[in-house]
Amino acid sequence: MPVTGGAGKPGTAIRVSGLRKTYGAVEAVRGIDFAVGEGEIFALLGPNGAGKTSTLEILEGYRPASAGDVRVLGFDPGDRSTDLALRREIGIVLQDIAVDSFLTARETLAQRRSYYVDGRGVDETLELVGLSAKADARVSKLSGGQQRRLDLALGIIGKPRLLFLDEPTTGFDPSARREAWDLVRSLRDLGTTILLTTHYMEEAQELADRVAIINAGRIVAEDSPDALGGRDKAAVHITFTMPSGARVEDLPVDGRALDGNSVRIETDDPTRALHALTGWALDRGDRLDGLAVTRPSLEDVYLNLTANDATRTETWVS
Ligand SMILES: Nc1ncnc2c1ncn2[C@@H]1O[C@H](COP(=O)(O)OP(=O)(O)O)[C@@H](O)[C@H]1O
Ligand SMILES: [Mg+2]
């Protein structure tokens, strides 16, 4: 089981408290707190401009914080005297593709491999990211998705204890995305702590032990993907097409007629409601066509929590 470490507890890989980042007049990060336990996959989920990359780059030691306290594997990433020690323990996949185009994939990895005392083999790493067949191709000849895989390879070749992934699968086709997810899971199984950002709900749902939704520089919700925003306790919707000749008033539970012949029932007790409904339909010799039972999706929760925010509209436009 992953350690869901609170601030300062042993087993905490990352601890962030009161973090702020301003660029001139822009308040990109407005006081956020979170902790990531060792071995955990934690996702920062949020729209463009929410402050995800700024947060990651501070944790990676690429940018100074404007205020707040940050610990990464016990280090202060802003402390230049311990910079190198921290760098050896972490892997980084930046948001933008970061590889030189004139080297081959293998040369690029071999160069990076030489920074680490105890890294992975180049061929093993190529294999892990599914690039073996392109080992000797120049980076400039790789597709966008293949270049991204090479970024991922650069992030893991040092066998990092902690891996930062900033939108790791943006630009991937669906099958490449699933392969990347398998890779991330296998890294987790090896004990790697992973902090990732994404704006794909499905990615957060599939990979993360815990998710924080960040919007306009603030964390607006934090929980496991299944429980975020009270999803696990939210009312269930049962929908189906009304059997011909039946009316909403005839139903054994309270329902609401929607467009067409659809009916929706909202209930906190879906077991009982379904039992009553299906019993009612069978007694009548009817079917409940289109029967579906749903809870709010992660996307529903996300859209709800990130809606009605002026900053969001602004940043989407920019
Ligand atoms: N170097 C920078 N200079 C000025 N503003 C920046 C810089 N980097 C990011 N910002 C601004 O900070 C806000 C957060 O950006 P960012 O951290 O990249 O968010 P995200 O990764 O969630 O899209 C945005 O409004 C962005 O325009
Ligand atoms: Mg970003």
Image: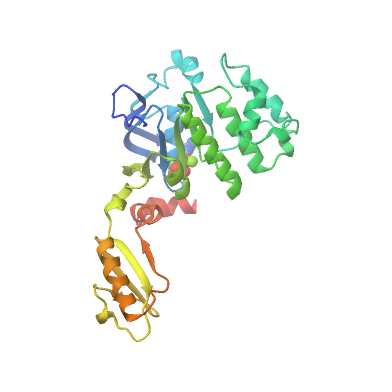
Question: Does 245 sit left or right of 88 as displayed?
Answer: left
Going 45% across and 32% down the picture, which residue do you hit?
Answer: 194
Name the spot of residue 276 as percent of width and height, x first: 26, 70
The image quarter containing residue 82 is: top left
Would residue 23 be visible to someone looking at this image?
A: no
The image quarter containing residue 50 is: top left
Number of numbered discs: 0
Examine the rendered structure and indicate whether residue 254 appears above or below residue 71: below
Going 29% across and 27% down the picture, which residue do you hit?
Answer: 7
Examine the rendered structure and indicate whether residue 175 appears above or below residue 122: below
Placement of the N terminus among the 4 image quadrants? top left
Name the spot of residue 267 as percent of width and height, x first: 26, 64
Name the spot of residue 151 as percent of width and height, x first: 60, 33
Residue at the outermost bottom position: 245
Name the spot of residue 273 as percent of width and height, x first: 26, 66
Going 37% across and 31% down the picture, which residue do you hit?
Answer: 2
Instruction: Looking at the picture, tell me which residue is in the foreground, 31 or 306.
Output: 306
Going 74% across and 39% down the picture, which residue do you hit?
Answer: 141
Examine the rendered structure and indicate whether residue 275 appears above or below residue 95: below
Rendering colour mode:
rainbow
Instruction: Looking at the picture, tell me which residue is in the foreground, 295 or 229.
Output: 295
Would residue 219 be visible to someone looking at this image?
A: yes
Instruction: Looking at the picture, tell me which residue is in the foreground, 201 or 140.
Output: 201
Question: Does 138 sit left or right of 26 as displayed?
Answer: right
